[in-house]
Amino acid sequence: MYEVLEDFAQQNDLRETSPGLKLFIGVSSILLCVSSPGPVAPLLVAATMSAAVLALAKIPARFYARLLLIPVSFAVMSIAVVLFVTGSGAVLLEIPGLPLAITAGGANLALLLLARVFGGMCSLYFIALTTPMTEIFDILRKLRVPAVFIDLSMLTYRFIFILIEEAGQIYRSQVMRLGYGRFRESVRSFGMLAGALFIRTWESGESLMLAMDARCYDGRLGIPSDSRPVSALALAAALLYLSAVFGVSLSTGGLVLV
Amino acid sequence: MHIMEGFLPSPWWEIWFLVSLPFIVIGLYQLNKLVQEKREALPLLAVAGAFVFVLSSLKLPSFNGSCSHPTGTGLGGVLFGPCIAAVLGLIVLIFQAVFLAHGGLTTLGANVFSMGIAGPAVAYLIYKAGTRAGANTYATVFCAAALADLFTYVVTSIQLALAFPGTAGFLGAFSAFAAIFAVTQVPLAIVEGAVIMLVFKYIVQLKPEILTRLDLLSESTIQKLREAAA
């Protein structure tokens, strides 16, 4: 699953668009979602970002739908609290026997939060599915993020894929030997998995060190970057889109559900 | 316990970025110094970061069937100290947001504070206190990892309650958030403590030189632990 997200980032139809522009659109839409006072603008962002992901980048719809389900559990739990804790306005629903009630104020806030989360998640997926991590590192370097931080993230990134592979192998062989049959066994097996993984990781880190030393590593990873110029038309379209969303967010600020 | 993208409203997500910033700056400074002194530190830190990421992307067995993920923050805090763990936490959280849709970019500051700073700091302090008091090493590791997890979730509840006090006020909202997350987080903390304890045990049995090199355990303690296991 994790490899798949990055696989799509490497070969979607927006791959050749300037990574700076994609990152700019994604991050600005997130900021617009978070600062929007009403739920309409975030929902608009969610719809347009999903359209961009599906139609422009050509990500399969089924896969995208599955991705959208990931954050649901946290959303449901936290929004339930907000729904009951915020009490202002008319009471819409009372739970018999418990001092809990859903009020208009709570419902509006919950709706707004749901819209913001939805819009933010879609924008995040837009970045994740169209821009490979390696290009994001490149942008970070241009933004003068400390080199040691970027080197550390790049090495971490490299190792994630190796380790996921190994963890998967260990996990599958444990499952085949009924390692997760009962609760006690599953805790034991998981501890074994994590311990074996940690030791293997450490060993591969040590061999990486040797390999890098053999290639004259001097504390700096030099990686050439290729720059793809942003076309004026694309930039103009992006700015137009963002200002349209901003306009919607301003004009619908007063809109409430009840 | 990640807060999702878009959940924290405007002053709060900026405030948590500002709160986390000094820890990250100190962490980067320490990291720079460490890398200049010992070049081998960088690859080893990188694999540790990747390990935390992979661990958190696996499902942990849980009592109530809900899907929970270990945070691995306790281990990072014990191994590298809280400030470097904060930098590792930041990197892992960025990858989690971009690859797994756990957490988000605007909520990064709040998440870094709860999982990258508060959790590891608690783990580190408990581990130091435990070893100084001469307590059983495995029990200390269990407490450090489990309490780091619990504290992370308490901090998340505080962050949410501050942002959404509602009419119940901060305390009322805090207890509501804490109660609803406790359903998944309390069992998770116990399981994670047990898992990290087992990890520690495997390291002691198979590759104790990792622990001596990080100055976590002395040769004599490891000798004693291995004898006890044999």
Image: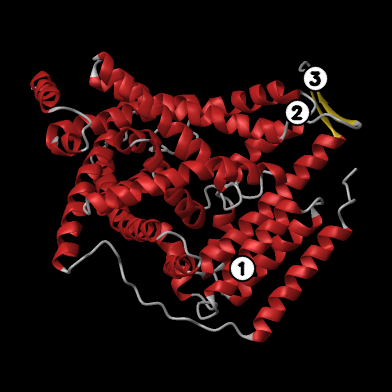
Query: Which chain's residue wears label 1?
Result: A
Q: Sort mark 1 into few (<14), some (14-19) or many (20+) by Cα contacts within 10 Å.
A: some
Q: Secondary structure at mark 3?
A: loop
Q: Sort mark 2 into few (<14), some (14-19) or many (20+) by Cα contacts within 10 Å.
A: many
Q: What residue is drawn where x is 30% and y is 67%? A: A221
Horizontal side of residue A63 vs A181, given as left or right: right
Q: What residue is drawn where x is 55% and y is 72%? A: A20
Q: What residue is drawn where x is 42% and y is 38%? A: B71
Q: Secondary structure at mark 2?
A: helix
Q: Residue A24's mark? A: 1
Closest to the camera, between mark 3 and mark 1, is 1
Query: Which chain's residue wears label 3?
Result: A
Q: Are marks 3 and 1 on the same chain?
A: yes
Closest to the camera, between mark 3 and mark 2, is 2
Q: Which residue is mark 2?
A: A85
* Position in image of residue A191 (x %, y %): 28, 34
Give the amino acid at mark 2: Val
Q: Which residue is mark 3?
A: A96
